[in-house]
């Protein structure tokens, strides 16, 4: 079946719908990824499942969706920009309907660069909200340890309990609005764009890997495979699996860059945790204190998040939801 040209508004709708559906499905795993990546020294969570179980116990079911409102609000423009920009760049770089590998990589690079405008503040706010529960849990563990140790205070258990409760109340309920206003008041717009360089270092390579790899995997599903008609649409399941496969490979490949970005954008640090002056300082401190394996923290979570996210995105594009919506509105 020949593939008809899709208008830019339809691409934007497709990207937005894909982002909303995808984020709703995988956000708890993304929360676990952020908390695991931010762990330094004292281990509150032993892994993804342990993190999710402890989060539900301490914060309830909706605790797994801490920060989801920010993501759901901004993921529509973010995913729309990423997917639509890649399509636009691919069309501009194509000659006679064919796009060489360097063109695919360049298109992915352009898409990754464009999305950073929305991605950086979205990730900045999301990380603070996601990590608040980990900080509260860490304070509770520290307070319990202090309470069990000999102390001069006549009532250490009561003091520790009050301290833990106060810390939990103060740290567990930040809001995106409060964080945004505080950053704008103290640091200006630059505060919301903290970690832009690290975000670019993550998103540009991701797009450079993802989009060419997806195009190759998706082409296998067409008649004639890689040498078939490039305008022919691959079967739905092929597009979905190609999105999942390319997404998981790209996600794992850039995990070290995601760890650096997450650490740099985290404003509140736990007891004994490092703060960083920049990308190079972050890399040096992580290597010295935690070793090379620290750069792979959350790799499994990232693969489990990104794979269905992009599989859903390609499925939405395939189904042409944007075109159908525009057709109803006409």
Image (spheres, helix red, strand yellow):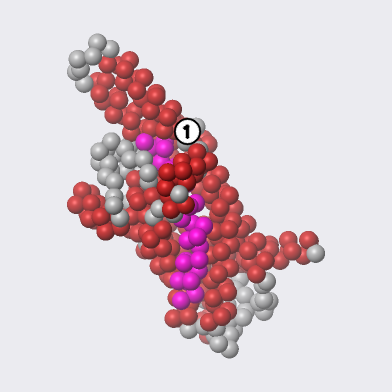
Residue 269, image x and y in percent? Answer: 33, 40
The residue where tag 1 is placed is 173
Q: Left or right: where does residue 74 sit relative to residue 199?
A: right
Residue at the spot x=50%, y=32% of the render?
A: 60
Q: Return the residue nearer the eye: 241 or 102.
A: 102
- The question of residue 123 being in magenta is answered with yes
- Number of dots carrying numbers: 1
Q: Left or right: where does residue 5 sit relative to residue 45?
A: right
Residue at the spot x=58%, y=49% of the render?
A: 73
Q: Return the residue nearer the eye: 106 or 280.
A: 280
Residue at the spot x=53%, y=82% of the render?
A: 93
Residue 240, image x and y in percent? Answer: 56, 64
Q: Give the range drawn in magenta.
A: 106-135
Disc 1, SS: loop
The C terminus sits in image quarter:
bottom right
Question: What secondary structure is the stretch in magenta mostly built from?
Answer: helix
Residue 266, image x and y in percent? Answer: 37, 46
Residue at the spot x=24%, y=10% of the render?
A: 154
Judge whether 212 appears above or below 66 on screen. below
């Amino acid at each position: 079946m020949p593939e008809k040209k899709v208008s830019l508004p339809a691409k934007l709708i497709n990207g937005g719908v894909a982002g909303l559906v995808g984020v709703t499905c995988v956000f708890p795993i993304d929360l676990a990824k952020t908390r695991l990546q931010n762990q330094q020294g004292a281990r509150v969570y032993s892994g993804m499942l342990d993190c999710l179980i402890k989060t539900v116990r301490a914060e309830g079911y909706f605790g797994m969706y801490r920060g989801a409102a920010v993501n759901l609000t901004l993921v529509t423009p973010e995913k729309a920009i990423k997917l639509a920009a890649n399509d636009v760049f691919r069309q501009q770089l194509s000659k006679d309907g064919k796009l060489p590998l360097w063109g695919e990589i360049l298109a992915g690079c352009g898409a990754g660069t464009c999305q950073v405008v929305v991605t950086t503040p979205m990730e900045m706010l999301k990380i603070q909200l996601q990590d608040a529960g980990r900080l509260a849990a860490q304070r509770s563990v520290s307070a319990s340890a202090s309470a069990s140790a000999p102390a001069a205070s006549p009532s250490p258990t009561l003091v520790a309990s009050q301290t833990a409760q106060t810390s939990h109340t103060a740290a567990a309920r930040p809001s995106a609005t409060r964080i945004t206003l505080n950053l704008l008041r103290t640091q200006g717009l630059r505060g919301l764009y903290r970690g832009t360089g690290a975000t670019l270092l993550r998103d540009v390579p991701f797009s450079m890997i993802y989009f060419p790899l997806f195009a190759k995997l998706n082409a296998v599903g067409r008649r004639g495979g890689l040498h078939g008609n490039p305008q022919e649409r691959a079967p739905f399941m092929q597009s979905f699996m190609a999105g999942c496969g390319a997404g998981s490979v790209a996600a794992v490949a850039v995990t070290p860059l995601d760890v650096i970005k997450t650490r740099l954008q985290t404003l509140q640090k736990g007891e004994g945790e490092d703060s960083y002056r920049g990308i190079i300082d972050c890399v040096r401190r992580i290597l010295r204190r935690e070793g090379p394996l620290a750069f792979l923290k959350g790799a499994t979570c990232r693969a489990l998040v990104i794979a269905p996210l992009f599989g859903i995105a390609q499925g939405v594009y395939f189904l042409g939801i944007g075109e159908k919506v525009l057709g109803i509105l006409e």
